[in-house]
């Protein structure tokens, strides 16, 4: 075949004609969401010593979860960070069973007028940033703190929260860990409040753990829609609140909001009922899975 004919053949080749479409397919953003379990779902058995952290990891792998949100309260010696050997053992186990850690969390409170008290809480968060990095988890979940402090306005207290989060976030960024502030119906009650705080922290290393069960001041799905651009992780619960009334979550509506957003990644579920989590967690997962995949 002459050189001119070869070039004509190649130009007309379906293989070359499809290169552009293949490139588009590869570069298209993934719509994938992934399932994870918030460890608090097993709070009863974990606190009673009836289940170990390793046992919970096995449960997740056996039931098809892709991730685990490993709340630090359940690690031995909390609030002291365990040894590297222990943390690396957990990390290795996750790898062995095909499970990822979607995040961790510590129990902090920045709502103190005393700066030295806030500094202690900041150090607690920094300690668990280090642990989170060693575990290989991308996110550390933190709280703002208690609902209020007599004698101080929301704005005054929010300044303490923002300053504390800024220091934690600057530290976490150097460790490759994202700080996730959870709306927990404590100091943070509304989407506007959490957005205000995150915008003032003003860092790509600080975002929202979107807790669907803790928006109780306004219509919950409007709040989720407003807050979701700031979400870096979730707590998807079986129930939400309409005013003061607890009602079943509308998963269809919730996932329509999620899929219309730019959120990608894990959707950790959390069950809070006192029933056996070995039964109710798989039941809730079965309800959620059709919307995730």
Image: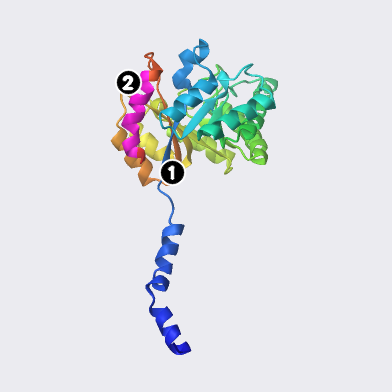
Which residue is rendered at x = 42% and y = 68% of the image?
Answer: 20
Q: Nearer the viewer, residue 187 or 271?
A: 271
227 shown above or below 184? below
**Along the line of sight, the residue nearer the viewer: 279 or 252:** 279
| Residue 158 location (% of width, % of height) | 56, 29
Q: Is residue 227 magenta?
A: no
Residue that numbered label 2 is attached to? 246
Residue 37 % position (x, y): 45, 28
Residue placed most toward the observer, 99 or 242: 99
Write down the residue under mark 1: 263
Which residue ends up furthest to the front in the rendered image?
A: 1
Q: Could you classify mark 1 by the number of other residues whose Cα lies within 10 Å: few (under 14), some (14-19), or many (20 or more)?
A: some
In the image, 195 versus 205, the foreground residue is 205
Label 1: state its secondary structure: loop
Residue 238, visible in the rendered structure: no
Helix, strand or loop at disc 2? strand
Please provide the residue range marked out in magenta.
Answer: 279-291
> Which badge, 1 or 2, is on the more N-terminal residue?
2
Numbered disc in front, either 1 or 2: 1
Residue occupying image coordinates x 44% and y 53%: 29
């Amino acid at each position: 075949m002459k050189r001119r004919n070869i070039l004509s053949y190649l130009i007309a080749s379906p293989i070359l004609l499809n290169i552009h479409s293949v490139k588009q397919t590869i570069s298209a953003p993934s719509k994938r969401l992934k399932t994870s379990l918030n460890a608090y779902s097993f709070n009863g058995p974990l606190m009673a010593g009836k289940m170990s952290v390793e046992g919970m990891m096995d449960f997740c792998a056996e039931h098809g979860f892709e991730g685990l949100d490993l709340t630090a309260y359940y690690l031995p010696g909390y609030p002291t960070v365990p040894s590297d050997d222990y943390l690396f053992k957990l990390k290795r186990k996750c790898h062995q069973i095909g499970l990822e850690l979607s995040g961790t969390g510590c129990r902090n409170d920045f709502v103190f007028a005393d700066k030295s008290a806030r500094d202690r809480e900041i150090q607690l968060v920094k300690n668990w940033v280090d642990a989170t990095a060693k575990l290989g988890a991308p996110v550390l979940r933190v709280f703002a703190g208690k609902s209020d402090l007599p004698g101080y306005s929301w704005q005054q207290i929010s300044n303490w929260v923002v300053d504390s989060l800024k220091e934690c976030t600057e530290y976490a960024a150097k460790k490759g860990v994202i700080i996730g502030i959870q709306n927990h119906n404590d100091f943070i009650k509304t989407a506007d409040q959490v957005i205000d705080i995150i915008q003032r922290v003003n860092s790509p290393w600080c975002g929202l753990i979107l807790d669907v069960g803790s928006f109780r001041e306004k219509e919950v799905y409007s709040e989720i829609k407003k807050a979701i651009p700031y979400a870096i992780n979730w707590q998807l619960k079986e129930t939400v609140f309409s005013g003061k009334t607890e009602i079943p979550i509308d998963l269809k509506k919730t996932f329509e909001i999620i899929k219309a957003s730019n959120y990608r990644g894990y959707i950790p579920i959390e069950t809070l009922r006192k029933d056996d989590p070995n039964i109710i967690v798989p039941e809730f997962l079965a309800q959620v899975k059709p919307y995730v995949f």
